[in-house]
Image: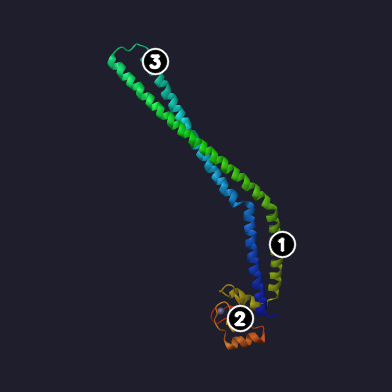
Amino acid sequence: MNPGQLLLRYQGQVERERAVREVIERLESRLASDPEVVTLEEAMQEARAAQDAVAARLRESDHTREDHRSKLRTREKELMSGRIRNPTELMQMSEEVAHMKARFAEEEDAELHLMEEGEAADEAARSVASNLADAKRVSAAEEPALKEELEAARSELAEIEAERDEIWAQVPPAAQAAYKRTRAQPPVARVVGNQCTACRVTVTSSGMQTLRKGLDELVHCEHCSRILVLA
Ligand SMILES: [Zn+2]
């Protein structure tokens, strides 16, 4: 195998290595956290926050109603006590009591709506909790297979790296340097039908001759400067 062919094989290993590393990264990230579970955990937090918000409004509403109820009772007692004889004052007070009763009724209605909101929030939270539990079960069930896959990918990576290093060791230093110097990526391109397959430009006839002789001398594409190898 001449240096160009070795470099092409080396490049192939580098590409395989990159692909396997991506697989490993994806598996590791999935094993670290399942995006489905993470999304549902966030939804769970939101559902709990919504429950807390309704609960706080209910407490506030209870407090206000309690306050208004006791004021209303006090006023009613005063009204019924017979202590107030002045008709104007009586009239004012009875109007005030009527007004307080109306407001109290409105507050009762509002409280009922709030309780309905609270029930809806509870139901939503229950539903998210159930979905989250399901997602966690599915995620846990998938883990053993994913771990096996990860294990296999890691040993494949080790093999690729060993092979890659073995090939690189066979590449003459001048060709190694040429490979590292080449800016275009990937640095090696096959030649098919007299064309550089990377940039589609036709290889010069002298370049083709050198390639056909299969010598140690490297041929570069005149257009993209990649190292050329006959397919
Ligand atoms: Zn080219």
Q: Earlier in the sequence, mark 2 or mark 3?
A: 3
Measure the C-alpha gap from mark 2 to mark 3.
105 Å
Q: How many residues crowd mark 3 within 10 Å: few (<14), some (14–19), many (20+)?
A: few
- The numbered mark at residue 88 is none
Is 153 drawn above or below residue 164 in the view shown? Answer: above
Which mark's residue is nearer the viewer, 1 or 2?
Answer: 2
Location of residue 106 by image quarter: top left
- The numbered mark at residue 77 is 3
Picture quarter with the C terminus: bottom right
Ligand 1 within 8 Å, label 2 CB? no
Q: Residue at x 71, y 69 (%)?
A: 163
Q: Earlier in the sequence, mark 3 or mark 1?
A: 3
Measure the C-alpha gap from mark 1 to mark 2.
33 Å
- Measured from the top left, where is residue 94 in percent x and y? 33, 19
Asked if one can make out residue 51 in the rendered structure from this viewpoint, the answer is: no
For the residue marked with disc 1, what is the amino acid? Ser
Q: How many residues crowd mark 2 within 10 Å: few (<14), some (14–19), many (20+)?
A: many
**Tag 2 near tag 3, CB within 8 Å:** no
Q: In this figure, which residue is indicated by the disc labeled 2?
A: 191
Query: SS at mark 1?
Result: helix
Q: In this figure, which residue is indicated by the disc labeled 1?
A: 155
Is 167 drawn above or below residue 217 in the view shown? Answer: above
**Tag 3 near tag 1, CB within 8 Å:** no
Asked if one can make out residue 28 in the rendered structure from this viewpoint, the answer is: yes
